[in-house]
Image: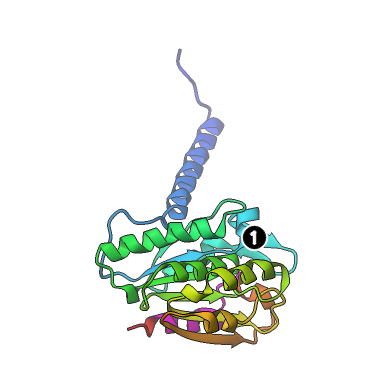
């Protein structure tokens, strides 16, 4: 039996094929931040860890106060700065310490493949920043870069989680660490207490922003934090 296509159905079929192509292209783009199968030891690698809103609401999470957190726009912007970005949209209620061990193993894999530690950065926002702190305490390497963006929950709903880290793991902090937060943030603030508890080699820097959007400062790849973070990482020796 022959299938006869009208002019209208042919047009609809053409549109459908185009849409499939676009969706396939998007899928390829969204999956391009996985751990690479082939390691280029000359590249600069960045692990990017998003906040809890993405866990709960997906890659385009919307907060009633801070607006849209476009995860893929964030990762692409960081990739555009010259980094090979490794990242994923985590599942709901991801355990901080278990996930920190997973990323630590990936970092060790890069090191085993000949990547210099100063070419590796772990960057995390909010819950991702808390995970970053744990990764620093797990990896005994003073030259790896860590950026904690509003990840020290010294106030607000993450206070208990942060206090547990201070009691159990802060003494193991190691590496080159940048803490950056907005002065209007009512959830997270200074990491100074964690830095003071570190018993290993830590080179810490803390940067206070006055954007005025609090935790929402890091919901978009704003130049106010993007420029100093990239500059700080590039100063690694």
Q: Is 19 located above or below residue 114 in the figure?
A: above
Residue reaching furthest to the top: 1
Q: Which residue is mark 1?
A: 53
- Asked whether residue 122 is in view, the answer is yes
Q: Is residue 145 a member of the stretch shown in magenta? A: no
Left or right of 34 on screen, residue 129: right
Residue 124, image x and y in percent?
A: 52, 69
Q: Is 90 located above or below residue 176 in the figure?
A: above
Q: Is 35 located above or below residue 14 in the figure?
A: below
Q: Is 82 located above or below residue 50 in the figure?
A: below
Dividing the picture into quadrants, the one containing residue 126 is bottom right
Residue reaching furthest to the right: 64
For disc 1, the neighbor class at 10 Å (few under 14, some 14 to 19, many from 20) is some
Q: Quadrant of the C terminus?
A: bottom left
Dividing the picture into quadrants, the one containing residue 217 is bottom right
Which secondary structure type mostly characterizes the magenta part of the structure? Answer: helix
**Residue pictured at 55% horizontal, 86% vertical:** 207
**Residue pictured at 60% horizontal, 86% vertical:** 208
Q: Nearer the viewer, residue 53 or 134?
A: 134
User: At numbered mark 1, what does the secondary structure look like: helix, strand or loop?
Assistant: helix
Residue 191, image x and y in percent?
A: 58, 80
Q: Quadrant of the N terminus?
A: top left
Q: Nearer the viewer, residue 127 or 197?
A: 197
Residue 163, image x and y in percent?
A: 64, 71
Q: Is residue 229 a member of the stretch shown in magenta? A: yes
Residue 160, image x and y in percent?
A: 68, 67
Q: Which residues are magenta?
A: 219-233
**Residue pictured at 58% horizontal, 56% vertical:** 59
* Number of disc labels: 1
**Residue pictured at 56% horizontal, 75% vertical:** 149
Q: Nearer the viewer, residue 121 or 133?
A: 133
- Asked whether residue 223 is in view, the answer is no
């Amino acid at each position: 039996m022959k299938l006869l296509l009208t002019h209208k159905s042919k047009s609809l079929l053409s549109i459908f094929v185009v849409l499939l192509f676009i969706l396939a292209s998007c899928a390829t783009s969204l999956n391009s931040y996985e751990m690479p199968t082939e390691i280029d030891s000359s590249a600069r690698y960045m692990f990017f860890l998003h906040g809890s809103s993405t866990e709960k609401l997906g890659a385009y999470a919307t907060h009633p106060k801070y607006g849209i957190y476009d995860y893929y726009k964030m990762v692409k912007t960081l990739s555009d700065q010259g980094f090979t970005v490794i990242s994923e949209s985590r599942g709901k209620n991801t355990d901080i310490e278990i996930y920190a061990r997973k990323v630590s193993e990936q970092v060790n894999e890069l090191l085993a493949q000949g990547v210099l530690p100063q070419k590796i950065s772990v960057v995390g926002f909010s819950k991702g920043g808390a995970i970053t702190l744990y990764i620093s305490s797990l990896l005994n390497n003073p030259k790896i870069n860590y950026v904690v963006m509003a990840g020290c929950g010294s106030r607000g709903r993450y206070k208990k989680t942060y206090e547990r880290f201070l009691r159990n793991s802060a003494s193991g902090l190691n590496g080159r660490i940048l803490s950056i937060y907005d002065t209007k943030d009512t959830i997270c603030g200074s990491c100074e207490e964690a830095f003071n508890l570190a018993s290993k080699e830590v080179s810490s820097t803390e940067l206070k922003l006055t954007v005025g959007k609090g935790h929402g400062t890091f919901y978009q790849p704003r130049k106010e934090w993007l420029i100093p973070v990239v500059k700080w990482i590039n100063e690694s020796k």
